[in-house]
Image: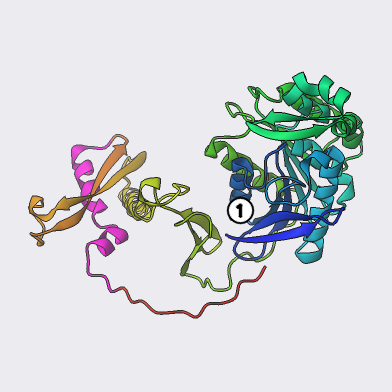
Amino acid sequence: MRTERLSFSNAKGEKLSALIDFPLGKPDAFALFAHCFTCGKDNLAAKRIAERLAMNGIAVLRFDFTGLGTSEGDFADTHFSSNVDDLVAAADYLREHHGAPAILIGHSLGGAAVIAAAHRVPEARCVVTIAAPSDPMHVTAQFKDDVDKIKADGELEVALAGRPFRIKRAFLEDVAQHKLHDYLADLHKALLIFHSPTDQTVGIDSATYIFTHAKHPKSFVSLSGADHLLSKKSDAAYVANVIAAWTTRYIEQAEERTDADVEAGTVLVRETGQGKLQQEVLSGPHRFRADEPVQVGGDDSAPSPYDYLLAALGACTAMTIRLYAERKKLPLDRVSVRLTHNKIHAEDCLNCETKEGMLDRIDRHLTFEGALTDEQHKQLLVIADKCPVHRTLTSEIDIRTFERPAVPETT
């Protein structure tokens, strides 16, 4: 995955700050993400969902609405209609420079905004809402005690999520005139609704309303246990993975996603530009990430290199044992491998040639399920040491390093 920072102009000519998270290789589709009210493109939910979608082959543009983040303009002069206009401007930018968005994704009030904007983005085939209110007017509940004063005085500074924002009477008047019922009736796009039944900010009844008033095709996914902002990494990852799988029914996948630099039998590792140490790993059609724990300078966004090393040994061990058990017709129902890696003093290893300094120790614990005899258990323990990865790790390895000229990335 790589990230491109950019800006585009809204309807008033103000520059809006944005970025696109690209997958490595040709994107299957482009998506446009609308963040929650007073949030921004770098909101954790938006960031995590966009990055995971990119891992799944979908390029995602996320941006700061007018007056938020690093975008130009005054937030006090914005309203729901201007947010919808900003979304359309973002779609126009994608269409002109990369490819029109096939997917519109909105979180909270952004969900209502993508429903309202959908008819102005004809290429969009899928609309996704996450914890969206059924009525844009719901957002005023965040400053309900100040509504009367705003109406009377024309504007007022209110505190939202601990930050000051100036809200004008025009905002209240604008948000009151938008009814999602009308937009849903004319959506004519596949709709996917995410909502937590325990959402304390926007109740589950909003999801019921949206689902009931939308026409098919429509789907609902319950985010049981999630909060409104999807604070848990696992919740954001789940949402992205479901979106990636769900959209395959409506969006034609790119015929070729493999990177031009990756030949069969080759693994490509590249920095993602996200965090200090995060890497993206490509192996044929498979894409995954690597990182390090926070305590050693990473973001803990993915398994570490040593985690993958243990995974390689564990997977190879289990496969080798399985093949042996089938060939010998052993009653092995299941094999599990648990591994740990540590550094130990060489003097503590009785069977090691090295007697000074530190060396690596991998402890491998095997669990066999099935009606095996004691002798069969012993056979399988012996076979574990014969797996190819085990042999590689315990033999002399010749690693050669060369410099390969960089190839310009294309989208």
Where does the magenta region start and end? Answer: 372-398
Residue at 29% x, 45% y is 339
- Is residue 28 or residue 149 the one in the foreground? 149
Residue at 71% x, 23% y is 204
Q: Is residue 284 visible?
A: yes
Q: Is residue 219 visible?
A: no
In the rendered structure, the answer to whether residue 72 lies left or right of residue 335 reads right
In the rendered structure, the answer to whether residue 396 lies left or right of residue 269 reads left
- Is residue 393 or residue 114 the one in the foreground? 114
From this view, report whether residue 205 is shown above or below residue 162.
above
On the image, the x and y values in percent for residue 83 come to: 81, 43
Q: Is residue 391 magenta?
A: yes
- Is residue 282 or residue 229 the one in the foreground? 229
- Is residue 304 or residue 379 the one in the foreground? 304
- Label 1: few (<14), some or many (≥20) within 10 Å? many
Quadrant containing the C terminus is bottom right
On the image, the x and y values in percent for residue 273 come to: 53, 60
Residue at 80% x, 42% y is 114
Q: Is residue 222 magenta?
A: no
From this view, report whether residue 407 is shown above or below residue 202.
below
* Label 1 SS: loop
In the rendered structure, the answer to whether residue 70 lies left or right of residue 375 reads right
Quadrant containing the N terminus is bottom right
> Looking at numbered disc 1 in the image, what kind of residue is underneath it?
Asn
Q: Magenta stretch mostly in which secondary structure?
A: helix
On the image, the x and y values in percent for residue 202 come to: 71, 25
Residue at 44% x, 47% y is 300
Q: Which residue is mark 1?
A: 56
Chosen colour scheme: rainbow
On the image, the x and y values in percent for residue 261 come to: 54, 73
